[in-house]
Image: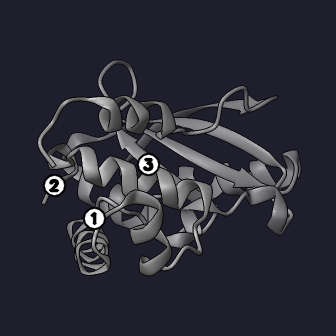
Amino acid sequence: MSASKLDRLDARILLALDVNPDASALALSRSLGVARNTIHARIARLEASGALGSFTRRLRGAAMGYSLTALVSISVMQTKSHLVEAGIFTIPEVVEVHATTGDADLVAKVLAKDTTDLHRINTEILRLEGIQRTSTVISVLEVMPTRMQALLERMAGEDNPV
């Protein structure tokens, strides 16, 4: 099952887990009016397919002392992109990377303790073989964190067969 194959019941299960992440299959079964084995099988499929990310994705950087978030646009020498991608994964403060179109080839979400720490991380990124240049912006306020609830609510309300 891929993320694009979620159905109405999957959406209902995920919304229920969003409200109570510790809910047992039995509790979900009762609240959703679905057999416990069905709930258990659906959750197992969601996890196996990658539709459900790791638990650590819920963790906030500030809770670990990383109160500064920055987005680093990275231009890469195309023949060295594999080296850059391998190198970027060795930097723990780089918590997310997207390949992009436009002026930058990659955009990395970086967590830092402060601006001095961000400078150290940027220097580490720039030392990677294959980096042409970077441009960094600091997030001053997270206006809206990543959210899936509104999409799940829409999906849960659709008239898709369960």
Q: Which mark is residue 143?
A: none
Q: Could you classify mark 1 by the number of other residues whose Cα lies within 10 Å: few (under 14), some (14-19), or many (20 or more)?
A: few
Taking the spot 67% from the left edge, 63% from the top edge, the residue there is 59
Q: Could you classify mark 2 by the number of other residues whose Cα lies within 10 Å: few (under 14), some (14-19), or many (20 or more)?
A: few
Q: Amino acid at mark 3?
A: Val
Please give the residue where the numbered disc 1 appears in the rendered image. 50
Q: Secondary structure at mark 1?
A: loop
Figure check: 157 above or below 66: above
| Label pair 1/2, CB-CB below 8 angstroms | yes
The quarter of the displayed image where residue 63 is located: bottom right
Taking the spot 20% from the left edge, 46% from the top edge, the residue there is 7
Please give the residue where the numbered disc 2 appears in the rendered image. 2
* Front residue of this view, candidates 52 and 89: 52
Please give the residue where the numbered disc 3 appears in the rendered image. 97
Taking the spot 63% from the left edge, 50% from the top edge, the residue there is 110
Q: Amino acid at mark 1?
A: Gly
Residue 160, position as x, y percentages in the image: 15, 36
